Image: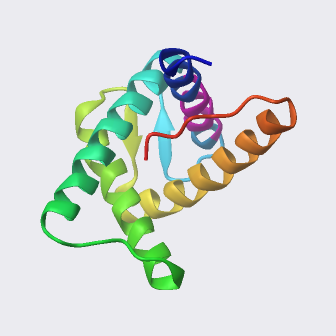
Amino acid sequence: MTPILNFIVAVVVAAVVLMIVSRLNLGLSVANFTAAIISAVVIALVGAVVLWLLGALGISIGGGLLGTIIFLIVAAVVLMLSDRFVSGMKVNGFGGAIIAAIAIAVVYWIVGWLLGLLGIQIWTPL
């Protein structure tokens, strides 16, 4: 697939994942699919900026358990920051953001695995 088509597929998949997590009531709610698409793009942009800032400050996210915990906290902060920019998205505090970040990771992994079985690879920006 072309890079633009990969990006569109990744945004649509991320929006579907946000809708699924929203319907599971796990600390994140999205009003509709349009808000989910906007949220997916904003989350990707905010995540890229936050990770760039961390890199500019010399803070790297390593591997292992500590790296996973740090990445989870960064993902929760990204969700909370994105909540400020998207009117159709609501995050229920830091605890809700942590739970939503875990749920998004799990659902995104499952959707990516299922699409992989169909021969469709998802491009992930981060």
Residue 121 visible: yes
Colour basis: rainbow
Percent x, y of residue 105: 59, 54
Q: In the displayed structure, does residue 79 sit left or right of residue 119?
A: left
Q: Nearer the viewer, residue 72 or 112?
A: 112
Task: Say which residue appears at 78% left-offset and 44% top-offset.
Answer: 113
For the N terminus, the image quarter is top right
| Dominant SS type (magenta) | helix
Outermost residue toward the left in this view: 57
**In the figure, 86 relative to 114: above or below?**
above
Q: Is residue 32 left or right of residue 78?
A: right
Q: Determine if residue 32 is in view.
A: no
**Residue 51 as seen in the image, left or right of residue 114:** left
Q: Which residues are magenta?
A: 12-20
Q: Is residue 86 magenta?
A: no
- Verify whether residue 15 appears in magenta: yes
Question: Where 13 sits versus 44, above or below?
Answer: above
Percent x, y of residue 39: 40, 31
**Percent position of residue 91, x then y:** 39, 47
The total number of labels drawn is 0
What residue appears at the point 53 percent right and 61 percent down from the top-left corner?
A: 99
Residue found at x 23% / y 39%: 84
**Residue that extends furthest to the front in the rendered view of this protein:** 2
As rendered, which of 61 and 83 lies closer to the eye? 61
From this viewpoint, which residue is outermost toward the right? 117
Q: Dividing the picture into quarters, in which one does residue 74 lie?
A: bottom left
Q: Position of residue 77 (x, y in %)?
A: 31, 58
User: Is residue 104 found left or right of 70 in the rendered image?
Assistant: right
